[in-house]
Image (cartoon, rainbow, N blue to C red):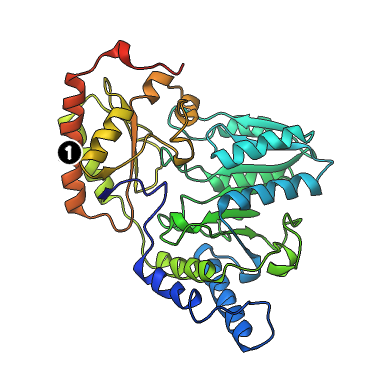
Amino acid sequence: MIYLDANATTPADPAVIEAMLPWLRENYGNPSASYAAGRHARRAVEKARAQVATLIGAEASEIIFTSGATESINSLHLSARHLNPERPLLIISATEHAATLESAARWQKQGGRVKTVPVSPHGLLDLEALDRALEPEKTALVSILWANNETGVIQPMAEIVSMAHRCGALVHADAVQMLGKLSVDVKSVPVDYLSLSGHKMHAPKGIGALHVSHHAPFHSFLIGGGQENERRSGTENVPGIVALGKASEITASSPHNSELRDLLERRLLASLPDILIHSQDAPRLPNTSSIHFPNVDAAGLIIRLDQKGIACSGGSACHTASLHPSHVLEAMGYDARHAESTVRFSLSRFTTRIEIEQAIQEIIAAVKHLRAQWNHDSVVSLA
């Protein structure tokens, strides 16, 4: 398989698997236990905590291990709503991940207010609209997806933080797609909260973290035995935590570059000049390409490429099985029919030039084949 869906999940790095295996076999002690095996597990957890902290420029004590970014986002939103009843306003962007969109819907059901800030046709947050949306003394949280999972667009987080802090609001950055591709430093971009998932950076699924700055309040979502310094109860997932720590260590020394993504786009444009690469002129992740293929049904293209051993997607993995257009592309001004002809290619650290060159040939051939059979009226409109 030529795997071009890394924004959905990444293959686990062999070094990460090797690091976690002993904690699935002989090193099975509970890190809360006081005997040697427990102390050994506790040291492994704290080593991993330091590794994750180093990756984002944080202090180890600011890292809470979770099951993934969805839990981190849910926990943080619930905490912000609970701790700031006098500040009812949550601000998000129009291109957020489902975890934030659903958390925002719950925020409203719990009596809060939500403002959704629009984006430009390139997918960048409208900073003037954000400035108008902010309400001093009323805004509890600004929660923004730092890099978009569908288009790869990178939001101006430093400016967002500065604007929000000026009116007394706290800021959460969903950095799931940033880590493993670009450097993140919470000291230079002082977000109050940051969420991440291991399986987007070559660790296994089911492990993630929430960064909570020393100066930011946090109310525990999961209560019980008081693990994670009483901020997330439940026996720690030691193998997953060790894996996340190792992945963080590798990621810190393995910067991603855009050479292969650019090659893919350049060759496709040369053979298919009518395609549209979304957000090509905006800051983007170096691994992500969202491409509109006119007169091609994206679902048919994905199936045909799958038959050729190439894995890609129509957009967010969280919505692959649901019949509705991309809310991200709609927020950028595109209609449902446009989204139905859009495919996302996202590369991982393990993607090779040979794979990209083979994928280019197959994509071009598949597009030409499908266009020869295209019947515009036969495509089910989701509008």
Quarter occupied by residue 103: top right
Please state the horizontal and vertical placement of residue 327, each as a whole percent of the image: 50, 28
Q: Residue furthest bottom?
A: 36
- 354 on left or right of 158: left
Percent of width and height locating residue 279: 38, 34
Q: Using the image as rendered, state which of residue 126 and residue 54 is in the foreground.
A: 54
Residue 101: in sight, yes or no? yes
Residue 313 point in image, percent of width and height: 36, 38
**Residue 223 to residue 101: above or below:** below
Q: Residue at x 41, y 51 (%)?
A: 9
| Relative to 236, residue 358 above or below | above
Identify the residue at horizontal 52%, vertical 46% (top origin). 146
SS state under label 1: helix
Q: Is residue 166 above or below residue 292?
A: below
Residue found at x 83% / y 42%: 85
The reply to whether residue 191 is in sight is no
Q: Is residue 382 left or right of residue 218?
A: left
Horizontal side, residue 286 vs residue 171: left or right: left
Farthest-out residue, right: 86
Q: Which residue is mark 1?
A: 362
Within the image, what quadrant is residue 297 found in?
top left
Q: Measured from the top left, where is residue 115 in percent x and y?
A: 67, 31
Counting other residues with Cα less than 10 Å from the Cα at mark 1, is it few (<14), some (14-19), or many (20 or more)? some
Which sits in the foreground, 169 or 82? 82
Amino acid marked by disc 1: Glu
Residue at 29% x, 13% y is 376
